[in-house]
Structures are given as C-alpha cells and as structure tokens.
Amino acid sequence: MHTINEFLIFEHDLEHDLEHDLEHRRDFSPPKIYTANGDISKRWYVYFSFRDPKNKKLVRQKNIYGNANTYKNKEDRLALLTRYRKRLLKLLQLGFNPYSDNTELYKTKFLNSPTAKPSLQQPSIEETQIEHQNTTRKENTIPNTKQNTESSKQKNEPLEEKGMTLREAFDYSLKLKENQISPRSLKDYEYTTNALVKWVDKNCPDVKTINQFDKKVASKFLNHILMSTSSRNRNNYRLNLSSLCQVLEDNEIITYNPIKKINALRSVPKRNKSYSTEEHKKIFEYLKNEDPLLLLYIKFISYNFLRPVEVCRLKIKDINIEDQTLQFKAKNKPLKKKLIPKKIIQELPDLSKLDPEFSLFTPIKIGGEWNTSETNKTNYFSKRYKTVVKDHFKLDKDQTLYSFRHTFISILYHALLKDSSPFAAKSKLMEITGHTTMSALEKYLRGIDAKLPDDYSDLL
C-alpha cells in the first residue's frame, strides 16, 4: 500500500499542469508550512487535515518532513517544503486519500498519463536550480558512493519520516520543562520516562518512535505500574507522562496527547498519623538530652506549622529576629512570611555573625554550609528521626516528622475554640497556618480529624 506521504516525497516530479480545473472538494484543508518562526534548530514540516471517512470530521494528519530538515539554511529548507506543499495540494486535488490505498490512482494519473511524462523529464528552471544547489552541497561534504548514499538514508529518513524516538522525544520535553518546574519534580519526570522507555523496549519492541506511542501502549504501561505498586503511584506516573506529552503536542511533535483519555484511578491518600498529647510530650522531653538539634528542627515544624522540606530550605537570611518573622518557599507558591513564636526565638543562637547564605539547619549545628539537594536534606532528618526517636519509642510507621504539623494544628484549633466560635477560631487559625481559603482549611481539619464533636453521652 502506498501512502500519500510516499508519493509526495518521491523523487520524480509530480508537478505537471492539470488539463482542467478540478471541482473544489472540502475534504481537506489547504496544506501549510511550519517554520518554527525561522528557527532552524527545530524541525520544519508541511501539515494539513483530511476528513475522516467514519466521523466526517477534519482530522490533523501526520506531519510531512521529507528531507527538508537535513538542510541547515532557511532558504533551501523553505524551498523544498514549498515544493512539498505544492505537490501535496495537487495530489489532494487529484483525489489522493490518506485513509486508502492510492496505488492504482497513482498509476492512472502519473504512470499512464501522457501529460505527466514531459514534466518528469523537464522540471522547471527554478526547481532545477534548487536541486543543483542541494546536490552540489552534498557532493562537497559526502563522496558520491553507494555506501554513503545508503548510510545517509539510514541516518536521515527514519527520524524525519517516522518521528523522534521515545527517548529523544521525552528528552526534548524534559529540556523544555527544566526551567518551569522544581529540580525535585524534574527528577520525578526523568524517573518516569526512564521506566517507560525501559518497559517499552522489553514489552513493545515494535514501538520505536513517539508517533507509535498511543493510548493502548500507555495503558499497558500504567497497568504494569498499577499491578506492581499501587493506584496512587500509577496516577502519579500518568500525571507525569501526560504533562510531558502535552509539551510534545503543544510543540507539534505529536498530533495528540495519548494520556489525556486515560482516567485517573481512585486511590486512598497516605495520611501521617498524629501524636497523642502524651506521646509528643515524651518525645520532646527525651530529645532535650538525646538530640537538641533534632528537637529544634521538630519545633520549627510544630510551632511554625512548616513542612519538613520548608524547614530544610531555610537560610540564615530568611530569619529576621528583630521583626520576629521568617520567610520561606511554600508548596507551589512564591516566598511566604510567617511570625516566629517567642518559644522558638528563645532557643535560637546568635545568627547575626553568620553568613546569610548558610543553611539554618545542618547535620551538626545551626547555621553552616550544607551543599546538597532539598530531597537529601529532608531524607537525612527523616532517617535521623527514625533512628533516634521512632525505633526507641516503637512508633507507628505513619507517625512521621510531618505528623507534628498535624498534631500542633489540632492543639491550636482546640485552644482557639475555648474562647470563640468555630468560625472565629478557624479565621484566626487561617492566619497562622497559611491556608488561603476557609474551605481549604476545613478540608485539612477534616482530613486530620481535628474537628471532633463535644461529648454526647447525655444524648444516648
């Protein structure tokens, strides 16, 4: 079966004059050229839409690259794509259809047509000049041997005609994402794509290019993740892949995002279990002598209601003792400012003589150099907490450093309720915790079971 793309980039000239005007049929859109705003480091191509015989809607067809992107100057590249566009328009007007076998139509229109032969033998002066320029440049760089010709075809044709490989496409998408997301998120994306490419190589060896990566292949991979891990992890992989594929769609590397039509699965979110009043008091008392640095780290989580990673981000310059405030980078938000309770300020050493760029917390002291990633810092204190506290008290696996934030928000909420209405208590709590809306705070309080009813024994 011959596709319309094969006819289009066939070496013989198909641009003979039509003997009569054909009736205009709106089964296709006029072909256009994508030039990436003149950027020759990107791929240029011809694109068009054709009416799907099943749903009768215009559907974007595969981009047509031919050999245009082998040329490294704008003039030659645009000249060849203009030629492709002109050929494509005539092929479509003659009745060529990307949804059917066009072999017989090709034989009828071109191989057996008397009007086609003069054109095959006598290309236009303009096209002859273009071909001469392209041939001259190739001859100056590559010896005209059969071996080199075959080698050139192997290098150029698969990438241009079939599309980028999976690895190339995802690497390109990651590069575009690099300055838009955090280093931590970028690492997650890289891990996801590495797992996908490795799985495809093993289980779908026929899938070589990004154009072959469709919903069916993506669903199989996500099912593999689901069966080997969990629905939550599978949803995270789906989210990462969808984001990267959307970048490829937006940059017209692929015609559609195959992950869009794959639904997320219901998953039970992981919850950090709060500590009882007795438990957190025992832990604080134990750490006074055992690990005072770890205790202060926990107090920043407990009294300032910060996440562990937010504490790890703090630098000396972020602490303003005079104004009794600190600034930090919150989750998916720019810098935020919070009041530092006096209970913490009283325990801080003199920070005025320290380098402002020093990390506030390091493994050995307050204020020092600690050149590693946020993830490594957070993991370090989590492991330290497990060794020093969790193993000693034999705590539940879901009782983590993050649990102190939940615990002390619950304590503060119940303290505020003693002297005010629930709405007033939540309004005051919003200012302290940093929740941006009342509904977000209420959802959070329900999630950690902070909102418990009064004793209802008299009603039973």
Image (cartoon, rainbow, N blue to C red):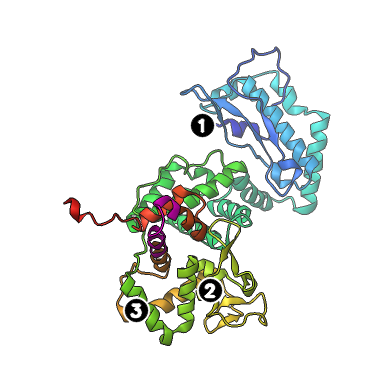
**Dominant secondary structure of the residues highlighted in magenta in the image:** helix
Camera-nearest label, 2 or 1: 2
Q: In percent of the image, x 52 and y 70: which residue is there?
A: 341
Which residue is located at x 81 percent, y 42 percent? 133
For disc 2, the marked residue is 342
Query: In the displayed structure, would residue 443 be above or below residue 414?
Result: above
In the rendered image, the vertical position of residue 222 relative to residue 18, given as above or below: below
Query: Circle 2 — which element?
Result: helix
Please state the extent of the stretch shown in magenta in the rendering. 411-425
Q: How many marks?
A: 3
Horizontal side, residue 143 vs residue 167: left or right = right
Between residue 97 and residue 308, name the one nearer to us: 308
Pointer 3: what residue?
Answer: 282
* Front residue of this view, candidates 269 and 222: 269
- Give the number of the mark in front: 1 or 3: 3
Amino acid type, residue under disc 2 in the picture: Lys
Amino acid tagged 3? Lys
**Residue 351: x and y, percent?**
63, 80
Q: Is residue 181 visible?
A: yes
SS state under label 3: helix
Query: Of the residues under marks 2 and 3, which one precedes in the sequence?
Result: 3
The disc, 2 or 1, on the residue closer to the chain's N-terminal end is: 1
Q: Amino acid at mark 1?
A: Met
